Image (cartoon, helix red, strand yellow):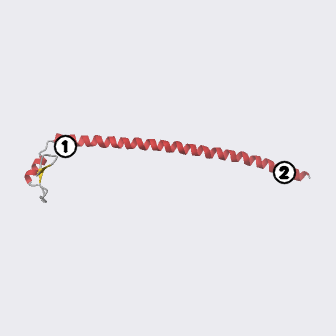
Amino acid sequence: MAPLSDGLSYSSSETSLPDMEELTTIARRPRADLSAKWSEGSRVMEGTLKALLDDLRRNLAADLNSFKEEISGVSRRLHDAEITMAAHETHLNNMEQEICEM
C-alpha cells in the first residue's frame, strides 16, 4: 500500500472506487486545509497571470514603438517625395515656359 498526499493509502492492484469509509474521511477533511490549498493555488495563478500580463504589456509597448518608428520613416519618405515632386513640377513648368517662348 502506498500513501496518498491526503494520508489515505491505495494498492496498485486496486481498480475499484474508494469505499465509503475513505470517502467519509475525505469529506471530513478540515475545510481549512482545502481553503489553504485553494488560496495557495490562487496566489500562484494570480502571480502567473500578472507575469504574463506584464510580458504582454512589454511586448505591446515594444511593438508600438517599432510601429511608431516605421510610421515616422514612411512619413519622412513621403515628405521627401513631395519635395522632389514639387521640384520636378517646377522644372517641368520652367521647360514648358522656355518652349512656349521659342
Categorize mark 2 by other alpha carbons within 10 Å: few (<14), some (14-19), many (20+). Answer: few
Q: Horizontal placement of 52 versus 18: left or right?
A: right
Q: Position of residue 4 (x, y in %)?
A: 15, 48
Which residue: 48% across, 41% down?
A: 61
Residue hosting label 1 = 34
Q: Horizontal placement of 18 versus 45: left or right?
A: left
Kind of residue at badge 2: Met
Mark 1 vs 2, N-terminal side: 1
Q: Position of residue 25 (x, y in %)?
A: 10, 47
Kind of residue at badge 1: Leu
As drawn, which residue projects farthest toward the right?
Answer: 102
Which residue: 10% across, 49% down?
A: 24
Q: Secondary structure at mark 1?
A: helix
> Total label count?
2
Which residue: 12% across, 53% down?
A: 10
Disc 1/disc 2 C-alpha distance (Å): 90 Å
Q: Secondary structure at mark 2?
A: helix
Mark linked to residue 101: none
Residue hosting label 2 = 95
Categorize mark 1 by other alpha carbons within 10 Å: few (<14), some (14-19), many (20+). Answer: few
Which residue: 55% across, 43% down?
A: 68
Q: Position of residue 41 (x, y in %)?
A: 26, 43
Residue 54 falls in which quadrant of the image? top left
Q: Position of residue 42 (x, y in %)?
A: 28, 42
